[in-house]
Amino acid sequence: MVLVGGGCSLGFTVYTGQHSGSIVLIVLFSGWVLSPFVTLLLVNAVAERWSTLERLSHYSLMVFITIGSLVVYSGLWSPPDAKPAFVFLMVPLVSWLAIGSAYLISASMPNK
């Protein structure tokens, strides 16, 4: 699911930026948009050693970020009068904040 979400997000990024005239800008935005998805996949590789509750939290975060990103990037829900660049900057930032918060909360919980 995260691979599909990352691929679709990349597609939305390239489609939205195709008329910008700057390939470098599209590449930079693509890296920023893909960064939460890559992180979730890398963390998933070590999640097998985690407790059931921690894995469930991680999997829920994967679903939430994937669906949320696709909904916002597709234009189904976005802030009114927001420029496309704003959306493609803020969604990964909010995703990173959600990832960081979830793992900080998980790390602060007493051992199960």
Image: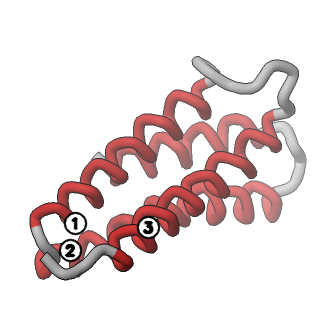
Q: Is residue 70 left or right of residue 78?
A: left
3D distance between C-alphas at marks 1 and 3: 19 Å
Q: Quadrant of residue 17?
A: top right
User: Residue 111: x, y in percent?
Assistant: 18, 81
SS assignment at label 2: helix
Q: Is residue 71 left or right of residue 15?
A: left
Compare marks 1 and 3 and give the one earlier in the sequence: 3
SS assignment at label 1: helix
Question: Which amino acid type is shown beneath numbered disc 1?
Answer: Glu
Compare marks 1 and 2 and give the one earlier in the sequence: 2
User: In the image, what residue occupies the spot 41% across and 36% down?
Assistant: 67
Numbered badge on residue 54: 1
Task: Identify which residue, 109 or 43, lies in the foreground.
Answer: 109
Question: Which amino acid type is shown beneath numbered disc 3?
Answer: Val
Q: CB atoms at circles 3 and 2 under 8 Å apart?
A: no
3D distance between C-alphas at marks 3 and 2: 14 Å
User: In the image, what residue occupies the spot 60% across and 37% down?
Assistant: 12
Residue on which disc 3 sits = 38
Question: Which amino acid type is shown beneath numbered disc 2?
Answer: Ala
Report the mark closest to the observer, 1 or 2. Answer: 1
User: Residue 92: x, y in percent?
Assistant: 62, 54
User: Residue 1: x, y in percent?
Assistant: 28, 46
Q: CB atoms at circles 1 and 2 under 8 Å apart?
A: yes
Compare marks 3 and 2 and give the one earlier in the sequence: 3
Q: Is residue 103 above or below residue 9?
A: below
Within 10 angstroms of label 3, few (less than 14), some, or many (20 or more) residues?
A: some
Within 10 angstroms of label 1, few (less than 14), some, or many (20 or more) residues?
A: some
3D distance between C-alphas at marks 1 and 2: 8 Å
Residue on which disc 2 sits = 47
